[in-house]
Image: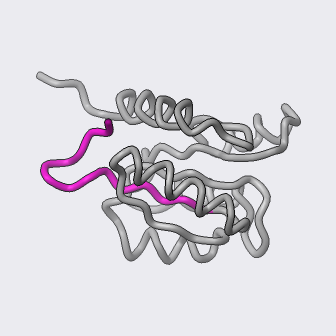
Amino acid sequence: MCRSTGEQPIKILVVDDAATVVEQLTANLRGGGYDVVTAHDGLEAKLRLREHPDTQLAIVDLHMPRMDGQELVEHIRDINGLEDLPIVVLTTDKAPANLDKAMSKGATGWILKPHDPERLLQAIERILDAASPAEP
C-alpha cells in the first residue's frame, strides 16, 4: 500500500490524451491508495500543477497534442518548487532516442504501455522512496 503525507494520500498527476489510459491509471493508482489528478495534454497539466502544488509525482504520456510529454517535462523542471518532482514517462514508443531525450529533459524514468498495474505501483513506490529525504 502507498505511503501518505500525514493523513493525506500522496497526490499523483496523470497526463495522457487517451481517455481509456487515464481511466486505467486512475483506477490502478486509487486502488493503491493514491490521490489522482488528471490532465489530457501538457497545457492542461500545467494548470493542474498550479491548482495542486502538493503533487508528488507525475506520470506523463510522451506523445500528446498541444504540448507533448518532453515539452511538459522541460516545463515542470522550470517551475519553482517542482524542480525535483519525480516524472515518469508513459509511452508505447520504444525508440531509445526518444526515451533518452525525455530523460535528458529531466524525466525520472519511463514505463511502456500497456502497463502492468502491479509493476506500476511497485515502480512508483521505488521512485517515491528514492525521492524522499533520508530519515534522521
Query: Which one is nearer the viewer's eye here, 62 or 19?
Result: 19
Tell me if residue 46 comes above or below residue 91 in the rendering: below
Residue positioned 63% across, 36% down in the render: 116
| Residue 18, percent from left and from top | 73, 65
Can you give x and y, in whole percent of width and height, for residue 10 in the image? Answer: 31, 50
Quadrant of res 1:
top left
Residue in front for this viewpoint, 112 or 84: 112
> In screen coordinates, is 26 left or right of 41?
left
Of 122 and 80, which appears nearest the observer?
Answer: 122
- Secondary structure, magenta segment, majority class: strand
Q: Position of residue 61 (x, y in %)?
A: 69, 55
- In the displayed structure, would residue 38 be above or below residue 134? below
Q: Is residue 2 left or right of residue 67?
A: left
Residue at position x 72%, y 69% in the image: 67
Residue 64 occupies which quadrant of the picture?
A: bottom right
In the visual, does 6 lie left or right of 25?
left
**Image point 71% across, 68% down: which residue?**
17
The colour style of the image is one colour
Evaluate whether residue 81 shows in this view: no
**Which residue is outermost to the top?**
136
Whole-percent x, y for residue 35 in the image = 36, 58
Q: Is residue 134 magenta?
A: no
Q: Which residue sits at x=50%, y=77%?
A: 47
Number of callouts: 0
Residue 11 on the magenta segment: yes
On the rendered image, what quadrant is the C terminus found in? top left
Residue 102 visible in the current orientation: yes
Query: Which residues fall within the magenta stretch?
Result: 1-15
